[in-house]
Amino acid sequence: MKIEHLGIAVKSLENADLLFSKLLGAEPYKHETVEREGVTTSFYKTGESKIELLEASNAESPIAKFIEKRGEGIHHIALGVENIAKEVERLKKEGFIFISEEPKEGADNKLVVFLHPKSTNGVLVELCQEKP
Ligand SMILES: CC[C@@H](C(=O)O)C(=O)SCCNC(=O)CCNC(=O)[C@H](O)C(C)(C)COP(=O)(O)OP(=O)(O)OC[C@H]1O[C@@H](n2cnc3c(N)ncnc32)[C@H](O)[C@@H]1OP(=O)(O)O
Ligand SMILES: [Co+2]
């Protein structure tokens, strides 16, 4: 598995874009809103991985709750997998707990599922697979 992206929760995508563009010396290659997840995203290429900036798109968003409780910062780590259904079955057998086992459409042409941070040392882990 490789680290497909790191998700970073930000209050303002506009301000964070200015900062990350300077930091990485490159512009984001994509902005995408995923309303079902309550997020607007901005993606940067960083070698073989990516950085996904996440701004809440509504008050109920996991990003709004996260920032309220913990402030801005690293929100999740996303692991790229070849076959998401197989990985869900494998990890369930290993005792990991999924927030939802059914892969859903994420951003940037991916199917995604999340493991609960309580089963992964307090880190929210996303599995993602390129959409067929
Ligand atoms: C754009 C789509 C996709 C992509 O393609 O890349 C994305 O990345 S979407 C990213 C946003 N979506 C999600 O985060 C979905 C998965 N998350 C959830 O379902 C929830 O956020 C949660 C993890 C189940 C927590 O929800 P809930 O229990 O309702 O929230 P609380 O605020 O009450 O938190 C409970 C507990 O969990 C801790 N927590 C919350 N978020 C995280 C996190 N990102 N990392 C680590 N821990 C987290 C929170 O602090 C609470 O802990 P305690 O206070 O100790 O109980
Ligand atoms: Co993500």
Image (cartoon, rainbow, N blue to C red):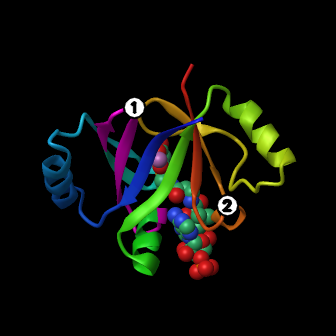
How far from the left and from the top, in percent, is residue 89? 81, 39
Q: Residue at x 42, y 52 (%)?
A: 7
Which badge, 1 or 2, is on the more N-terminal residue? 1
Side (left or right) of 52 relative to 123: left
Quarter of the picture containing the C terminus is top right
Residue 61 appears in the figure? no
* Residue that mark 1 sits on: 48
Query: Is 112 in the magenta?
Result: no
Between residues 5 and 98, which one lies in front from this camera angle? 5
Side (left or right) of 117 relative to 2: right
Specify the quadrant of the image occupied by residue 26.
top left
Q: Is residue 116 above or below residue 34?
A: below
Side (left or right) of 1 relative to 16: right
* Residue that mark 2 sits on: 120
Specify the quadrant of the image occupied by residue 87.
top right
How far from the left and from the top, in percent, is residue 83? 67, 27
Instruction: Look at the magenta stretch and give its main secondary structure.
Output: strand
**Number of residues whose C-alpha sits closer than 10 Å to that of mark 2, classed few (under 14), some (14–19) or many (20 or more):** few
Residue extent of the magenta highlight: 43-62
The answer to whether the residue bearing label 1 lies less than 8 angstroms from the nearest atom of ligand 2 is no
Q: Residue at x 63, y 63 (%)?
A: 117
Q: Is residue 45 above or below residue 131?
A: below
Of the numbered discs in the image, which one, if any, rests on residue 61? Answer: none
Query: What is the residue that sits farthest to the top in this orientation?
Result: 132
Q: For the residue marked with disc 1, what is the amino acid? A: Glu
- Distance from Cα at disc 1 to Cα at disc 2: 24 Å
